[in-house]
Image (cartoon, rainbow, N blue to C red):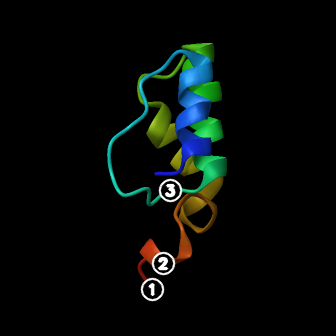
Amino acid sequence: MSKKIKGLYQKAGLKAPNGKGIHTEAFHRCVVAVTKKGKAKNPHAVCMSMLTPLKAVKKSHRRS
């Protein structure tokens, strides 16, 4: 995961997720925004639905 993405979470006062970093920066910005609003039970699912897998997952990690 890049330092820029970790910085998004730190700036928002959230814990950055662990992992390889298969999601795009746009996905992570969305998750932070949805989490700040606090209305969604699962901000990751909301952002995946809003952005679709084409914009939420890096090309090298997408299924065909």
Disc 2 to disc 3, C-alpha distance: 10 Å
Question: Between residues 41 and 31, which one lies in front from this camera angle?
Answer: 31
Q: Which residue is denoted by mark 1 in the rendering? A: 64
Residue at image location 36% in from the left, 58% down from the top: 20
Q: Which of marks 1 and 2 is in front?
A: 2
Name the spot of residue 31 as percent of width and height, x first. 56, 34
N-terminal of the two: label 2 or label 3? 3
N-terminal of the two: label 3 or label 1? 3
Identify the disc placed on residue 60: 2
- Furthest residue toward left: 19
Badge 2: residue crowd in 10 Å (few <14, some 14–19, many ≥20): few
Taking 11 as reference, is 16 left or right? left
- Furthest residue toward front: 3
Taking 59 as reference, is 64 left or right? left
Q: Nearer the viewer, mark 3 or mark 1?
A: 3
Q: Which residue is denoted by mark 3 in the rendering? A: 23
Disc 3 to disc 1, C-alpha distance: 16 Å
Residue at image location 48% in from the left, 78% down from the top: 60
Question: Between residues 49 and 15, which one lies in front from this camera angle?
Answer: 15
Name the spot of residue 32 as percent of width and height, x first. 59, 29
Corner quadrant of residue 53? bottom right
User: Which quadrant is the C terminus positioned in?
Assistant: bottom left
Q: Which amino acid does label 2 sit on?
A: Ser
Q: Element at badge 3?
A: loop
Residue at image location 63% in from the left, 50% down from the top: 25
Name the spot of residue 49 as percent of width and height, x first. 55, 49
Disc 1 to disc 2, C-alpha distance: 10 Å
